[in-house]
Amino acid sequence: MRVGLVQLTSSDDPQANISVVQDFVAEAAKQGADFVLTPEVTNCVSNSRRHQETVLCSESEDPTLAALRTQAAKLGIWLLIGSLGLKSDGDDPRFFNRSFLIAPDGEISARYDKIHMFDVDLSETETYRESDGYQPGKKAVLTKVAGIPLGMTVCYDLRFPYLFRGLAKSGARIMTVPAAFSPETGPAHWEVLLRARAIETGSFILAPAQCGSHAVLKGRPRNTYGHSLAIDPWGNVLADGGVAPGVTMVDLRLEDVDDVRRRLPSLANERDYQKA
């Protein structure tokens, strides 16, 4: 499988971001990608809930989703929209942070709502309360891309290994981790956590990322770490997208999953135990 990881520096203007991501998706397809992935919050990177309320849409009305579904069908590719910020149609007024797998006919093959909310105080000047604006998902999602079992996660989910292990035990051979990772934690944790999740589960990890300084019309600017990564089931880094927007191509040997899980059968060796 040939994969294209799209790295973006999305602004807080969803309309302006559409053409940028479409150009990178087209570039990946031109380079032979069967499967293209974009980062978390592809449509809008913003710390302003008031601005998000103004520019975000519901799933049925979101222009980024509509445009990328059309493009996937035109190019005949599988496309993971890492996530979109979307308005809710229900009673909870908070937004969704929702990842979409789009099939080569443009149909939505799977949806995943980010389960774990990024509520942290990294420093005196860098604080996040994702749960203030986004409602957490409640369900793990296992789907298939080109017939290959795929587990869907988003960014902060990376720090919860039981989610990845559960997906692997349910059959996932590839895990997606689209992200907008903080530059505060990125240098220390991003690569090592992705490699750990790959090693623990014997799976490919595909992690397209936001990068750089994000232009904003309203609110406080945000920076993200970049370094979109592809990791093999042994924990080797196959590709690193660096710190600038662009496309990173990588070829996956899916038989490596069987080979690693046969050599290190930790999924099969798991045992029940009494908790401390």
Image (cartoon, rainbow, N blue to C red):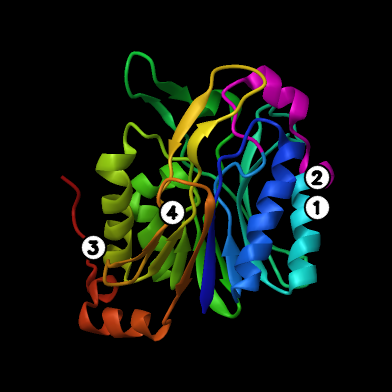
**Residue topped by disc 3:** 272
Image coordinates for residue 81, horizontal then vertical, percent: 63, 54
Asked if the stretch drawn in magenta spans residue 35, the answer is: no
Q: Which residue is drawn at 61% across and 20% down?
A: 48
Alpha carbon distance from label 4 to label 2:
25 Å
Residue 252 is left or right of residue 273, and the answer is: right
Q: Residue at 25% of width from left, 41% of height from top?
A: 188
Residue 123 spot, x, y in % from top left:
32, 19
Q: What residue type is labelled 4?
A: Ser
Q: Report the amino acid beneath label 1.
A: Ala
- Mark 4: secondary structure: loop
Q: Residue under circle 4?
A: 228
Q: Which amino acid does label 3 sit on?
A: Asp
Marked residue nearer the N-terminal end (3 or 1): 1
In this orientation, which residue lies closer to the viewer: 65 or 58?
65
Q: Is residue 86 above or below residue 108?
A: above
- Find residue 166 and report its image quarter: bottom left
Residue stretch in magenta = 44-62
Extreme-right residue of the structure? 61
The answer to the question of whether label 2 and label 1 lie on touching residues, with beta carbons closer than 8 A, is yes
Identified by mark 2, the residue type is Pro
User: Residue 63 shows which numbered tag?
Assistant: 2
Residue that badge 1 annotates: 66
Q: Which of marks 3 and 2 is in front?
A: 2
SS under mark 2: helix
Q: How crowded is mark 4: few (under 14 residues within 10 Å), some or many (20 or more)?
A: many
Residue 101 seen by the camera? no
